[in-house]
Image (cartoon, rainbow, N blue to C red):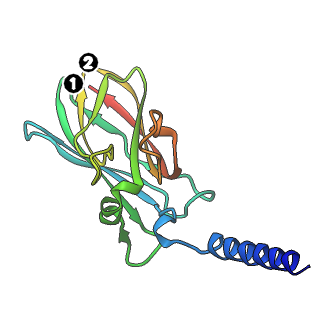
Amino acid sequence: MNNHLLKIGFLALFAFAVAATGCRKDDDTENEVITTVVVHLKSTDGTFDRRFTWNDPDGDGGLPPTVEDITLAPNKEYNAEVHFYDRSKSPEVDITEEIEKESDEHLLVYRVSGTLNLTITPTDTDSKGRPFRLKTRWATGAASTGSVVVTLRHNPNKQLPNLDQTGSVDAEVEFPVRIQ
């Protein structure tokens, strides 16, 4: 009988410990609040330096976001860097530095669509040498149109071959792009 009570007590203690640790909130794994995404493009020859903004100050629902079309010259290379802001607070919060510090827990994914002649190549990695992609090189081809979808993933499994589809989505925005 004592062994039976001891087992029940141990199981109850174990269940309590699992429940207590399972409900603890870890601030390092929370998704970011992002209302604004800026793509900063600089041509490698120094003739172009512009920022393009996707902005949704009221978040999901409500009013649709405002988006600046990206227009690039054909057959050029551009250094690109993405910046993230939370403009739901006053003053606004630039969370790009926090995302950089937590590069092991973030991944940027780019999807080029339409007939767009654009190749995006990563130029950075996280602290463990794995993909991060906050900084990239954009190489344009012939005149074309389409879009670039930029997705910021949170806690991706960077050890999987399909890492671009792991983790949760902090932000996903689409920029119309024209090469002319």
Q: Residue 101's x, y, as percent? A: 31, 63
Query: At 47% from the left edge and 46% from the top edge, which residue is drawn?
Result: 157
Quadrant of residue 60 within the rendered picture: bottom right
Tag 1 residue: 74
Give the side of residue 3 with respect to residue 122, left or right.
Answer: right
Tell me the tag on residue 159: none
- Figure quadrant of the C terminus: top left
Q: Amino acid at mark 2?
A: Ala
Query: At 23% from the left edge and 29% from the top edge, which residue is drawn?
Result: 139
Asked if disc 2 and disc 1 are in contact, CB closer than 8 Å, the reply is: yes
In front of the other: 32 or 62: 32
Q: Is residue 32 above or below residue 41?
A: below
Q: Residue 129's x, y, as percent? A: 27, 46
Query: At 26% from the left edge and 18% from the top edge, which residue is drawn?
Result: 142
Q: Residue 113's x, y, as percent? A: 44, 27
2 or 1: tag closer to the N-terminus: 1
Please identify the residue farthest to the left as the structure is shown. 45
Quadrant of residue 71 within the rendered picture: top left
- Figure quadrant of the N terminus: bottom right
Q: CA distance from mark 2 to mark 1?
A: 5 Å
Tag 2 residue: 142
